Image: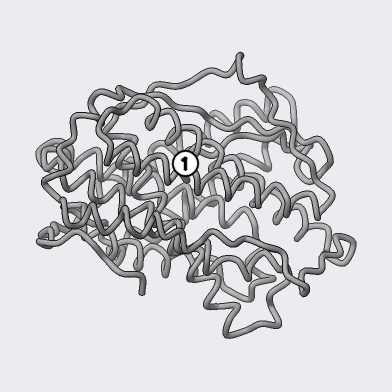
Amino acid sequence: MTSAEGTMAPEQAGVAGAVLVPRLYTTDFEVIDRIDVNAARDDLDAVLSDLRSDEGKQFDKDENWHVDPAAMPEELRKEFVDLLSSSLSAELSSGTLYAEIKKHLNNPDTRDLFALMSRDEARHASFISDVLRDLNVTIDPGIPAQEQRYSYFRPKFILYASYLSEKLGYVRYITIHRELERNPDRCFHPVFRSFEKWCHDEFNHGEALAVLLRAEPKLLGGLNKYWIRFFLVDVFATMFVRDHMRPEFFKALGVDTTEFDFEVFRKTTEITRQVFPITLDLEHPMFRSRIERLWHLAESSEAARGQGGIVSLVKRVGYGFARAWTWLRLYFLPVKPNELPQRVRLTPS
């Protein structure tokens, strides 16, 4: 899940032995087990078939896989390692969560969904770890398994966040893939050649979670619309801020960070019409200015952190309040109602 990225000490980013601490979650497994997936039997069978066919299973280094860490500019390398490390943390977090859910389910169909998704996340994590080793980065998992702490997340929050993160991940990967397909000279690392296959997994995971959400209509109506709105705003805003903190990465791709993010927002919004009864109004005149203010406040907070001392602390507290207020103003912008389609399933575009 995008929102489930772990943490790595900033001074350790990009060095051997960096400590990665993925966020781990637990939930009320019985609630998920009670979802009547028979309400979407045709779509469920199609999703299970796609997951079992395992189109994304080959993440192999071919004969053209050559990496010279010293050839990458230092700032680009730091940002690239930070991105890969965050992705690894998210894969570990999601994979652990899906595996835990699978262990506690009795419904064979739902259990298979989470087992297959957990399989994919483990494969992704292994591949990213291998890519990081090519960059002379080894990751320490940080906390022994027996000492890891799990945060409780309500089942509906798990479904909202996981669905949105999987679909957003699909759109990000396929957008980068197509950009580099048109401009192969900008492909500064061979990992990007794996993005198309990676997209199959992300897309299918989103479809599996869409089936579960649509099979439980109460999750998509009433006051739950406000929770859906919360996750839409939070996931989009988090992505926007994090992307703008990696300017060298997007410069190397040859894309404008803001335009890239808004393209991802628009495509993701179109996809989420299959499930969510509302969409954010991305064209509202205040949407862009408020999400950009969140980024600028985050930059200012990071600059203050580097100053140290009590003045730094006071500044960061002030920026924290300003970010919270700006986030709320973003949340309360008008949204657009969406009439859900009769069929859940989508096909990759």
Residue with the most extreme right position: 70
Quadrant for residue 280, please give it: bottom left
Work out whether residue 282 or residue 57 is closer to the camera in this orientation and state it: 57
| Residue sitting at x 69%, y 78% | 186
Rendered position, 258 above or below 112: below
Q: Residue at x 58, y 57 (%)?
A: 244
Q: Secondary structure at mark 1?
A: helix
- Nearest the eye: 308 or 242: 242
Tell me how the rendering is colored.
one colour
- x then y, percent, for residue 96: 50, 33
Judge from the rendering whether residue 186 lies leftward or rightward of residue 345; answer left or right.
Answer: right
Residue 220 percent coordinates (x, y): 15, 44
The N terminus lies in quadrant: top left
In the image, residue 219 sits, relative to residue 194, either above or below, namely above
- At label 1, which amino acid type do we have? Ser
Q: Position of residue 198 (x, y in %)?
A: 52, 61
Q: Quadrant of the C terminus?
A: bottom left
Residue 271 % position (x, y): 29, 63
Task: Reply above or below: 48 against 342.
Answer: above
Answer with the quarter of the image where residue 143 lies.
top right
Residue sitting farthest toward the bottom: 182
Q: Residue at x 17, y 58 (%)?
A: 336
Q: Residues within 10 Å of mark 1 (few under 14, many from 20)?
A: many
Label 1 belongs to which residue?
A: 118
The residue sitting at 33% across, 43% down in the picture is 231
